[in-house]
Each structure stands twice: as C-alpha cells, then as structure tokens.
Image (cartoon, rainbow, N blue to C red):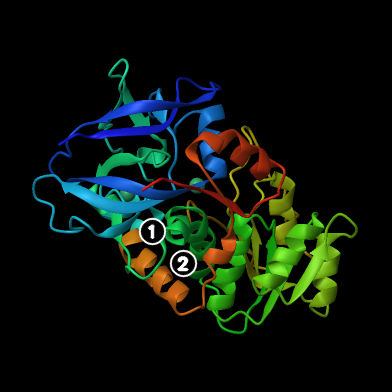
Amino acid sequence: MAREAIGAVVDAIGSEVRIEDLAIDAPETGEVLVRLVASGVCHSDLWAIEHGNWGAPFPMLLGHEGAGVVEELGEGVDTPRVGDPVVLAWAVPCGTCGPCRRGVPRRCSHAWQQPPRVRRARDSAPLAGTLSLGTLATRTVVHAAQAVPMPPELPLRDACLLGCGVSTGVGAATQTAKVWPGARVAVIGLGGIGLAALQGARIAGAERLIAVDVAAPKLAWAERFGATDTVDASATDAVAAVRELTQGDGVDFAFEATGVPSVVSQAVAMLDYAGVAVAIGVPPIPAEVTLSWNGTEDAAYPRKTSLLITDGGDPIPAEDFPEMARWALEGRLDLGGMVTRELALGDLDEAFRAMLAGEVIRSVVVFDP
Ligand SMILES: [Zn+2]
Ligand SMILES: [Zn+2]
C-alpha cells in the first residue's frame, strides 16, 4: 500500500514552515493510520515552533487539531475501524503518571509520547508530531486511543476543533470548573478558547455570561455565542465593571483565556465569595502572578478563593469528544460558527498572521480529498 502524503514540517526551533513530501510507516501494534480531512490552526502550533515541542525532538510535523478518516489498522486494534470518521486527541490520559495512578486521569501530566511513524521523503528523517499528533499533513499515524470516533453526520471541518481549542474551553467550564446551573460567569479573552469556555458555561446552565476583551469585534463574537453582558476592557477597569454588573458581588467563576499573568490576577479579583478562577491561557516564560491575599475587599484569603489551572480542558477524550459532538448535533454547541476561515495547507503563514491579528476565531486547513 502506497503510504504517501504531504505535510507541514519545521526543521528546528524558530525555523520556517515547509510543505514537504512524506513517507508514512505502517501503523504498528495498537496504532492507526488516518487520512486527514481538516485541521485547525492553534496558537500552540506557533508556540511549538517558537519554544519547542514539549520535549519531543525536531524536525516536527506540525498540527494537533485534526479530524479525518481511518485508513489502516495496526495489530490488535478493535476501535476505531477502517472508514470511521475520527477526531484526533493529544490529551489522552497516559495511565502511568501519578494522577492517572491515583484515579484522577483528568489531571494527567500528559507525559505519554507517540513515537514518530511519519518520515520526510527526501532524507527519511523521522518527524515528531506536535503534541504527539502532527495533523497538518494529509496522513498521519497515531495510537488508536488518540483517534476518537465521531458521528458520521458531524462535518469533520467543524469536528476537528474538538481536538484542541473547543475541548479546552468547553472542558475548562464543564470539567475543570464544574460550572453549575444559575452561576454568574466572566470570561476574559475571547479568542477561540475563550469563546469555547463561554459556550461551555452556557451549556452548563450559567445565567450570567460576562464577556471581557479589549477588542470590539471579539465582544461582538461573544454576543453571538451567548454572552449576556460585554465589558470593553480597553475603555474601563474590567474588575470594577464586572462587580458593577453583579451588584458589587462579583462572579462565581472567572476564566482567563489570554495567558497574560496580570489577567489571572484580574480573574481572581472579580470573584464573589468562594469563587473559582480558572487559568487556561499558556503564559510567557518566565511569568509570575501577583494576588491580593488579605486586607482588601477582593483579597483571595478571606474570600476563600480557588484558583485552578487547566491543561487542554482536562479531558478524557473518549468520553468528552462524543458528548461534545452530540451537543453540536443538538445545536447546543456551535462548532461551525467557530470556523471563520478555511484555507489550504500552503497558506499556513496567512493562518498564523490572521490568528495573531485577532481576525479569526479559528482557521481550518481543509485537505483535498
Ligand atoms: Zn497520566
Ligand atoms: Zn491547540
């Protein structure tokens, strides 16, 4: 069987992205070969180019938010089957780290690495996938546990977002924070992740959904995805505005989706008594967060504040992705509205530019069939 493909390859930290011919090894025991149909372009792809692939060596096969169709199975694979539509998951609980062994796989350290099965055709160099996937390619090989079957009626162009951005934001609300019905929620930073957190809080039954950003177009997006109130943080103090909108109380949950350390402090400062702040954004290196601890009205200690940090929405993909797919089919989770641009594999530079400029919620690369 000819196992050829093309994909986006990065030679070393900071190198440009090149579209290269690939040779794909046969899937080994427990693995599956997937033909990609669509792959979202995520901020973490850019992070991996600039900072490294979380310990995996270069060259790197870019991409970690893909959906496709299973073409070939390694030994011993029952699920998925050949022909199944799947979304690929980078955050599969490893089963061996401390939290996994203690029975809390949602707090997995994600130390598990998928060995590279994709090579660059011209020199046979093995290519480590971004976050053990490598989805910005027409084919890739992953562990069967990383390929989560999808209902066939859900378009893969939309479903790919479940692989990272949407499951991160929705999971931050439904799994990490466990937002309850009737809760008052603020989300700071309304890129793809923040909008997904807003949707997750809405699905969980939150009553107030206060969207905070410095960019007016993003506040308009937030209204489309269910925000009940918006705060333009370029014109007003976000913490004071959220308190004013909640009769001085503050919110039960505040999600930080910017990665900016001072915004974590803001999320904590806008909480009501016993509120929960969730940090989702990937911070700069190094970074420090300063919290008001005691002696002020919004200090964390007397208010029994919780600050949680999520990694990808703390998913168990085999459970969560099908549930989110069902929400999408039921019209409760707007996946299609998050895809604001479709482009080709050769247009990645434009995708990164638009992402940094805040012009898109998500760009999705759609591969030729
Ligand atoms: Zn683990
Ligand atoms: Zn991502």
| Residue 106 numbered mark, or none | 1
Query: Which residue in the rendered view is the most extreme toward the top?
Result: 123
Q: Residue at x 32, y 68 (%)?
A: 152
- Rate crowding at label 2 as few (under 14), some (14 to 19) or many (20 or more) other CA atoms within 10 Å: some
Disc 1 marks a residue whose amino acid type is Arg
Q: Position of residue 120 (x, y in %)?
A: 33, 23
Looking at mark 1, is its residue's CB closer than 8 Å to ligand 1? no
In the displayed structure, 273 sits above or below 212; it is below
Q: Residue at x 36, y 48 (%)?
A: 369
Residue 326: quadrant of the picture: bottom left
Out of 203 and 360, give the one closest to the viewer: 360
Can you say which quadrant of the picture contains the N terminus? top left
Q: Secondary structure at mark 2?
A: helix
Residue 20: quadrant of the picture: top left
Disc 2 marks a residue whose amino acid type is Gln
Out of 316 and 358, give the one closest to the viewer: 358
Q: Position of residue 53 (x, y in %)?
A: 45, 32
Circles 1 and 2: CB atoms closer than 8 Å: yes
How far, Cα to Cα, is label 1 from label 2? 8 Å
Q: In the rendered image, which residue does mark 2 sit on?
A: 175
Left or right for 82, reference 350: left
Q: Position of residue 192 (x, y in %)?
A: 60, 56
Give the mark nearest the N terminus, 1 or 2: 1
Q: Residue at x 52, y 29 (%)?
A: 49
Query: Which residue in the rendered view is the most extreme toward the front?
Result: 369
Query: Which residue in the rendered view is the most extreme toward the right?
Result: 235
Q: Position of residue 367 (x, y in %)?
A: 42, 45
Q: Is residue 351 visible?
A: yes
Q: Is residue 55 visible?
A: no
Q: Secondary structure at mark 1?
A: helix
